[in-house]
Amino acid sequence: MFKPFEYLRPKSITEAVELGVTYGSEAQYMAGGTDVLVNLKNKPQKALKFIITLRYVNDQLNYIKLEDRYLKIGALTTHRDLEKSALIQREYQVLHDAVSQVGSVQIRNVATIGGNICSSLPSADTASPLLVLGAQLKIMGQDGEKVVALEDFYLGHAQNILNKGDILTEIIIPPKKSYAAGKYYKLGRRGAMELPLVGAAVYLVMDKNLDLCLDARVALTTAAPVPLPAKKAAQELVGKPISPDNLTKAGKIAVQEASPRTSLRTTAAYRREVLPVLVRRAGLEAYERIKQNRN
Amino acid sequence: MGERIFCKINNVDYDVVVNHNETLLHLLRNKLGLTGTNEGCGSGDCGACTVIVNGKAVNSCLYLAVDIDGKEVLTIEGLADGEKLHPLQEAFIEEGAVQCGFCTPGVLMSAKALLDEKSHPSEEEIRKGIAGHLCRCTGYIKIVKGISSAAEKIK
Ligand SMILES: Cc1cc2nc3c(=O)[nH]c(=O)nc-3n(C[C@H](O)[C@H](O)[C@H](O)COP(=O)(O)OP(=O)(O)OC[C@H]3O[C@@H](n4cnc5c(N)ncnc54)[C@H](O)[C@@H]3O)c2cc1C
Ligand code: FES
Ligand code: FES
């Protein structure tokens, strides 16, 4: 049993937005509830009186589809549905790396990608892959709909730009480039059921001969108060061939951009030590994938 | 706040009143007397509370009871066919995959959901399928063996 609350079950997005606006800080949205309910158990907030579930608007926000080459994911899509999607497996491997490693099957069966983003923790597994894919978020609020870049969404640890009543409805990934792929590396202790100690995603776009890197993106997990795009590190890779040396160099730059802290799970020093290794490995693997996908 | 819901648990129709802040785990154990489903951590980490809702394995400690309105739930009590054990249960006994038994009902439900989805999972797939369970006794190897040998039998 949790601390008492009233459970509100809007049937449409508009109704959900209205309830969110009306009840403000007395209410919280819930999708899969794997963060909401654990928080309710461990550190219940006094003010919380209403939980507004999005489960009953699920039908409208549960999809994975390509539209004009843009990938569109409904915010209520579960990690498990993404993990099983042939499209994600084949074309968006860097995202598949993340969704297939969130918690356990039981968690993935209920936890949503939208919830992962909206919790806005630096440890969220989908964040770095979505950052390197250049994801945009569609948000519905009382003044209508807007689209923002994921990297402009986070404001700090567990903080984002959502206003009262705002609902994340869709994640949009721009068209895939040729000769491009990414890899997300998550470092943990037991390979299941845990948040990453630290993680890195690298996405590379190569020229036709795979000799030169035309564009690169690097993002880091649990390396700063927010999921962090490491732009200087990415810049370091552009215009050069992909090599272990170049990737290590980029990894070292990434560490300078990061500000990892010591937490319950591990120390800042350890995080700094392994980040360049993860960037190198992720980069080499992304490059391998580009080669494989070409063949 | 109380609310009346209708659901099917282990193929039996239920008409019960639940509170909004009540978990499915609480409903099963404390109101319906279905105590086969265990509570370990209460926060999604151990898998002892795993049941199947509409075909999917979920942690009943992180699932609100009101949300099973109109749904079908399968718990460990519904796995055997009367006195006849399910092949998974038999295989677990044969392989010695049960010691204290605390984790077992949850593991069996994940194994059932896994085999329903894929009749012949690889060892890797079995390991991923039960990654959400902690067992302090068996060391997992026997559990993995139990599941693959059950898969053979179910054929
Ligand atoms: C045992 C366990 C293991 C876990 N392992 C991992 C892991 O390996 N990696 C990882 O990244 N996470 C992990 N998590 C955390 C959690 O499961 C994920 O962050 C998950 O994606 C959250 O999704 P949810 O649908 O359950 O969110 P909820 O708990 O329902 O919501 C999370 C937050 O987002 C808000 N919200 C949800 N949807 C919307 C929306 N559409 N619009 C606006 N606000 C919204 C809610 O108000 C809440 O603040 C784990 C959790 C548990 C309990
Ligand atoms: S009691 Fe539900 S996962 Fe541990
Ligand atoms: S048999 Fe004892 S916990 Fe698994």
Image (cartoon, coloured by chain):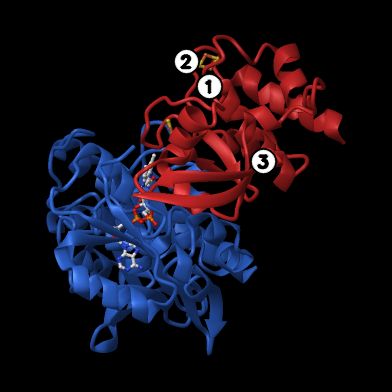
Residue A184: percent from the left, percent from the top? 41, 55
Could you tell me how far apart the alpha carbons at marks 3 and 1 are, in whole angstroms? 17 Å
CB under 8 Å between discs 3 and 1: no
Give the colour chain A carries in the figure: blue
Q: Which numbered disc, 1 or 2, marks the residue closer to the eye?
A: 1
- For the point 33% across and 43% down, which residue is it? A195
Quickly name the residue at label 3: B114
Local crowd size for mark 1, using a 10 Å CA cut-off: few (<14), some (14–19), many (≥20):
many
Q: Left of A150 or right of it: where is B45?
A: right
Type of the residue with mark 1: Cys
First of labels 3, 1 by sequence position: 1
| Residue pointed to by mark 1 | B103
Callout 1 touching callout 2 (CB < 8 Å): yes
CB at disc 1 and ligand 3 closer than 8 Å = yes
Residue drawn 30% across the image and 76% down it: A17
Chain to which the residue tagged by mark 3 belongs: B
Residues behind callouts 3 and 2 on a single chain:
yes
Residue identifier under label 2 = B136
Q: Work out whether A139 lies above or below B25.
A: below
